Image (cartoon, rainbow, N blue to C red):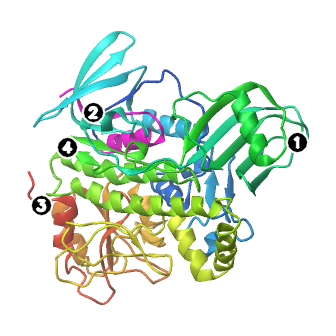
Amino acid sequence: MEYDVVVAGSGPVGLMLAAELRLAGVRVLVVEKLTEPAGHDRAGVLHTRTVEYLDMRGLLERFKDGMATVSGLPFGGIFSRGLDHTLVETRHPYSLLVPQSRTEELLAEHAAALDTEVRRGHELTALAQDADGVTVTLATPAGERRVRARYLVGCDGGRSTVRRLAGIGFPGFAPSVSALIGYVTLTERDVPKRWQRTGNGVVVLAFPPEGGIGRVVVIEYGRPHPPAGEPVTLEELRTATHRVYGRELDLVEPVLWMSRFSDATRLAETYRSGRVLLAGDAAHIHFPIGGQGLNTGVHDAVNLGWKLAAEIHGWAPPGLLDSYHRERHRAVERVLLYTRAQLALMNPDEHHVTALREVFEELLFLEDTNRHLTATLNGLDLCYGDEDGTDGGAVAGADGGAVADGGSGGGDGGARRHPLVGRFAPDLELEADGLTTRPTELLRRGRGVLVDLTADGGPARTAAPWRGRIDVTAARAPRGGAPAALLVRPDGHVAWAAEPGAAATDGLTAALARWFGPQDWR
């Protein structure tokens, strides 16, 4: 095989996935049909769980450099009471405002530092898979090229060629909302920056006080939606802005970028078909409210990377790679539900929706409700895993935190599930080898980690046969409140935990085998 994995698409999801694979020592080729980065900032916010993932890989400081943080993003365009990050448990109680172009740039640097091969101007045109691998046909500047790999992952957007060629269904809801976005020039001065719901839709204006290049977004309900690929004209954008905003704005050239989008909502029937997998917009599309799209795709990549690497290296237990679909499909179902709900709250229907918005506004002032919505929209309700490994998923608790859908703490099919299992690793202050650290810092290498906080070192001895696949750290928690031991997956989610004072190795062998394969896998 020339490569272990071909990743189609070099957007944030493709680059994050490629970097995760390279971190695990997988041979990766990233192919991208564009010759240069698009440079369009369709997204501009990294939510809390994404921030935690970046922290986990040691990338956060470069993403934060020069960027603002925010707590209080609106839900469904309700600004009087925003989502409150102080209500949720996290080391990073904020969302990070980073333009997509900057996110792409930083992830490209990260992937390059890991010697990731990226080929631009290479468009995937055909694929053929067999029992051993996938043959990918590429249109390149030098002519047609065929590449052989063990797996192919489509990170190539909502109109994914990989998904279409693999024959993966993409069911969902057809568009009912027509929306335009433009980075254009405004000749007027002092046009207020605003998000405004009017009788005809929603308009977003963000221009400098002196005029010049800025952004306008127009959302209209119930209007015909032209094909997504149909070019937007400046006159179309002007007319739509006037129709919704209620007065004409002098939008002129130069135009940096204009596009159209809709509320089409679709979710791939499966994230895996043989040796072909999907991630990001190739697997799910929805209306871009709340900044969910890019974040959800990065979560896909972090979940998939280590599992696919384990399969390639040969130690993956049965069903590990298939757990990618189980966990992420259910998680994204919730994302689609909440984006649809927010769009419904923005509908200009004065008779019914305005009343509903007033009720939601009251609910957002209730801490329990706000905590629940803040956790959900920031990805903090993710809880992976189940009792027998056949139906992993993510569900949210009534308090806004994550709860498991049944299951055992040790993966042994019988013990009570520890409340940490499936959640993102807690932010514990640890002392190990004379240094202060945290579980997320122990995950920088992209390997699983066993943190042994016992006095006798029993969990570390139990895990010794898996040391080729996980790191084992003996530590103490000086501030208390920690479990007796903690097994963390490479994506930062807890695979097993033991209560202090309990038998500190109960279920550990089963959990190690479930997530990291048999001890004698070679």
| N-terminal label among 3 and 1 | 1
**What residue appears at the point 51 percent right and 63 percent down from the top-left corner?**
338
Q: Which mark is residue 165?
A: 2
- Say what amino acid the circle numbered 4 marks: Ile
Secondary structure found at label 4: helix
- Say what amino acid the circle numbered 2 marks: Leu
Q: How far is mark 2 from mark 4, CA to CA? A: 23 Å
Q: Which residue is mark 4?
A: 312
Q: Position of residue 431 (x, y in %)?
A: 44, 71
Mark 4 Cα shell of 10 Å, populated few (<14), some (14-19), many (≥20): some
| N-terminal label among 1 and 2 | 2
Secondary structure found at label 2: helix
| Nearer the camera: disc 2 or disc 4 | 2
Q: How far is mark 1 from mark 2, CA to CA? A: 48 Å
Foreground of the two, 62 or 164: 164
Q: Give the vertical position of 124 relative to 441 (above or below).
A: above
* Cβ atoms under marks 4 and 3 closer than 8 Å: no
**What residue appears at the point 55 percent right and 40 percent down from the top-left corner?**
225
Give the magenta part as a residue range: 1-24
Q: Which residue is mark 3?
A: 518
Could you tell whether 144 is left or right of 265 in the image? left
Q: Which mark is residue 209?
A: 1
